[in-house]
Image (cartoon, grey):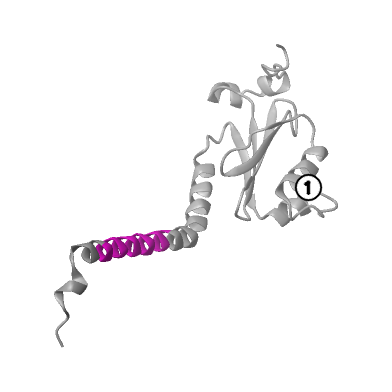
Amino acid sequence: MRIPDKLFNIRDKKTLKTLLSILLALLISLALAVTCILFTPSIFNSTLHKGLELLPKNKFIEYKVQSKTELAKEWLEESDGLRNDKSFFEQLRTKLPNSSNKDSFFAHMFVVHDYPAPCFFTLFGKHRTMDVTWTVTGIRCRGAKECNDPQFIDHCPPRKSDHQ
């Protein structure tokens, strides 16, 4: 059976080519979306762990990566605000003194100054879409010599924002 030439004129070939291009673009987009959904959590977790391991040990003395429920169990008596990240972080902030917001595109974060002792700080963070939280405790110092000096920690100078 022969198809008449009039059915496939130049205009129909352009339309068919455009439809195939759109279909190919949608397939590529779908493949990339599935790839991102499958591999982003593992890539983020490994990057977070590697990044925290690479922090200078003399300044960042402790870190912990855990789930949101584990963080809530550790810091809050009642963890009724677990569904909403914003209320969860507000609950956490009310338990801790002197904090400042450090939110980013990927994470809800805040820093608690002079905690657990003067000259120290603790950073709390939670990924916006994944169930991963991190807590980093560090010393507010400039270099290895200052960070390792017990005199510096005993007689901690005020933060820049405290004496302005």
Name which quarter of the figure residue 141 lies in: top right
Residue occupying image coordinates x 48% and y 62% = 38
Q: Residue furthest top?
A: 164
Give the prevailing secondary structure in the magenta stretch. Answer: helix
Q: Position of residue 122 (x, y in %)?
A: 68, 36
Question: Label 1, on which residue?
Answer: 75
Q: Is residue 82 above or below residue 2?
A: above
For the N terminus, the image quarter is bottom left
SS label for mark 1: helix
Q: Position of residue 84 (x, y in %)?
A: 73, 51
Residue 92 position in % (x across, y down)? 77, 43
Q: Which amino acid, by three-letter code, is at mark 1?
A: Trp
- Left or right, residue 62 beside residue 89: left
Give the residues drawn in magenta, as a range: 15-32
Q: Is residue 128 left or right of residue 9?
A: right
Q: Is residue 52 left or right of residue 163?
A: left
